[in-house]
Image: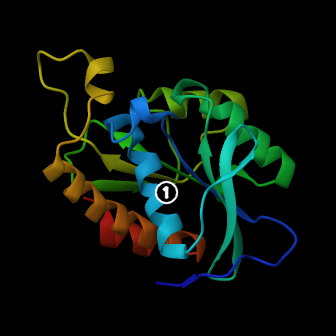
Amino acid sequence: MFFRKKEALSSSVEYIVVGLGNSGTKYENTRHNAGFITIDRLAEKLGVRIDRIKYKSLVTTCTIGESKVLLMKPSTYMNNSGLAVVEAMNFYKVRPENVIILFDDISLDIGKMRIRRKGSDGGHNGIKNIIYLSGSDQFPRIKIGVGHKPEKWDLADWVLSRFSEAELKSLTETADKACDAVSLMINGQTDKAMNLYNS
């Protein structure tokens, strides 16, 4: 859907797509890493690898539609995601409106996603840090459902718990929809993306 696999040739990045998560094998396939899982899926569909170290992140550039896009996986750990995002924004002079954030949401069931044009942090520490350091809440975002916290679980333990095999399968299907949504958003069709995929 609007993807081009070759590396972008234009001189400057127009959009940044950020998947939030925690680096390291300790955190692989945990709920808090839904953003990492989704952006890895996007890179796979685009035929690129997010493997260059820059802006306190693993990054790569690609083309979506007619736009040059930077894909980012911050390596700052979740609570300091803004350090990486703002550094890249400042380098490329990208406005918040052109920075799409992919992240986990415990208020949504697994298999659900929600697109928003902007808004508050909703209690998410990664988003909170990005808003704080950038001074803006105008970031488009795609919230990936990771399931509601069971009553007896501590929140930190829940978001750092691993997905079951069945949950990962459902999450992958949601990630595929999120990839299509990113393409629509970059191509100026955010309303269409919201109508198609908000749940």
Asked if residue 138 shows in the view, the reply is no
Q: Which residue is mark 1?
A: 39
Q: Is residue 101 placed above or below 152 in the rendered structure?
A: below
Which of these two is toward me, 195 or 164? 164
Which quadrant holds the C terminus?
Answer: bottom left
Residue at 44%, 30% (x, y): give it: 124
Q: Is residue 177 above or below residue 54?
A: below
Residue positioned 67% across, 82% down in the render: 6
Residue 194 lies, in percent from the top left, at: 38, 66
**Which residue is outermost to the front?**
25
Which residue occupies the foreground of this view, 177 or 186? Answer: 177
79 relative to 147 in the view: left or right: right
Residue 101 x, y percent position in the rendering = 53, 49
Query: Is residue 140 visible to us here?
Result: yes
In the rendered image, the vertical position of residue 137 relative to residue 126, given as above or below: below
Q: Say whether residue 167 is left or right of residue 134.
A: left
For badge 1, the amino acid type reads: Ile
Q: Position of residue 54 (x, y in %)?
A: 76, 45
Q: How is the image coloured?
A: rainbow
Considering the numbered disc 1 on the image, is that residue within a helix, a strand or a loop?
A: helix
Q: Horizontal placement of 31 versus 120: left or right? A: left
